[in-house]
Amino acid sequence: MKIKSTISLQLTQKSGQTSQPPWKLLENSYCAVNLIDKNPILLKVSQNNIDSINVEYESLGCNIIDEKQINNKIAEIFDLNFNLKKFYKFLSNDEKLKPSVDFCNGLRLFLAKDIFECIVSSISSANNSIVRWTKSVDTIASKWGNGYNFDSGTFNSFPSPKILSTVYEDDIAENEGYSKKDNKKEILECKNNLKSCGVGYRAPYILKASEMFLSEINIYDIQDMNYEEAFDTIIKVPGVGPKVADCILLYGYGFKEAFPSDVWIKRIVSYLYFDGKDISVSKVREFGMEEFDKYAGYAQLYLFHFARKSGLMDKLSKK
DNA sequence: CCTCAGGGATCCG
DNA sequence: CGGATCCCTGAG
């Protein structure tokens, strides 16, 4: 089916948002398994022009699928109900933001298909490269997620906090685990632990985070909180600081008033809005939230990509 | 072969 | 508050 909406699917997929790794590209379609009404559905999204996207799907067994639910899910993930035209009008009133549209036309939020996946992605993204954390998250899904065999191939969901909380942290823990079970000799090549997925020193954070979502924090309650309350809740999770918290709130839960502020946004905002004067990351966050208000999240997304594509980032990195 | 940064968080003073 | 350190991979 065809959904009419202005969006650049490729830009949105490749923009490095920490909601999830890009979906798997199969014959021009971005594919991922999604739980829709508790049924695993393979969504296949493609695009011929910027005014619409095409959605196909595969299901397992003979469940009757309501296409309206699929439509809603797609609209939710790609934020299709966000009024891009209105946002561009807002951008055009800001001399600094104005040029960003030329580089970001059709870029939308790429929201989490699985909120826990988003949280692990965001924790993994800290002081890390996009290629590395996306690879790690995909590896975690392939090791401990459910594998579903669709006609188009096998696709893995992301494991639940319950599953992930039981995996070994590293090679050492894994070997200890084995020797407890059955006096096995030490295995040199350990592949059944978090660190083997390349998350590095974030492995204990991810384990503790998994445990927290089993007991202290209900992952779905955050959806219904206001922004401040949600921020205070999610930042209690180990490995989650201010920037990662805002990423989770923006890309995971869709709090559009969040303005995730990292070193790059700091450099960009300092350059564009403060005449190059060095502003602290926390001040940049305050500035962004006040200046852009309900558009803060989108403004951050557009600023980052504008800087990336326009060469501004290269220019600022040499300072 | 090396060295260095990568959309930060944490701990420590 | 500021600064050092953290794992590991790819680019140079």
Image (cartoon, coloured by chain):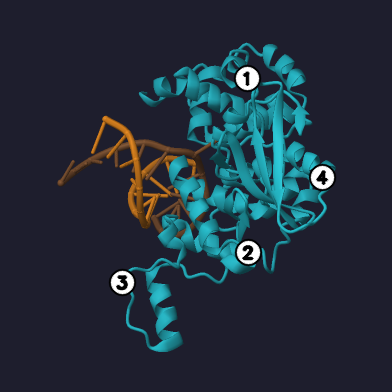
Chain colours: A cyan, B brown, C orange
The disc labelled 2 sits on which kind of residue?
Pro
Residue A189's mark? none
- Judge if badges 3 and 1 mark residues of a common chain: yes
- Judge if badges 3 and 4 mark residues of a common chain: yes
Q: CA distance from mark 3 to mark 2?
A: 28 Å
Q: CA distance from mark 3 to mark 1?
A: 50 Å
Q: CA distance from mark 2 to mark 4?
A: 25 Å
Image quarter (top left, top right, bottom left or bottom right) of the N terminus of chain A: top right
Q: Which is more N-terminal, label 4 or label 3?
A: 4
Q: CA distance from mark 1 to mark 2?
A: 36 Å
Whether residue A151 sits left or right of residue A55 in the image: it is: left
Residue A105's mark? 1
Please tell me whether mark 1 sits on a helix, a strand or a loop: loop
Examine the rendering and report whether any part of residue A259 can be seen: yes
Residue under label 4, please give it: A69
Residue under label 2, please give it: A161
Q: Position of residue A299 (x, y in %)?
A: 64, 26
> Looking at the image, which is closer to me, A165 or A243?
A165
Chain of the residue under the numbered disc 4 shown in the image: A
Residue under label 3, please give it: A188
Whether residue A172 sits left or right of residue A52 in the image: it is: left
Chain of the residue under the numbered disc 1 shown in the image: A
Q: Which is more N-terminal, label 4 or label 2?
A: 4
Please tell me whether mark 2 sits on a helix, a strand or a loop: helix
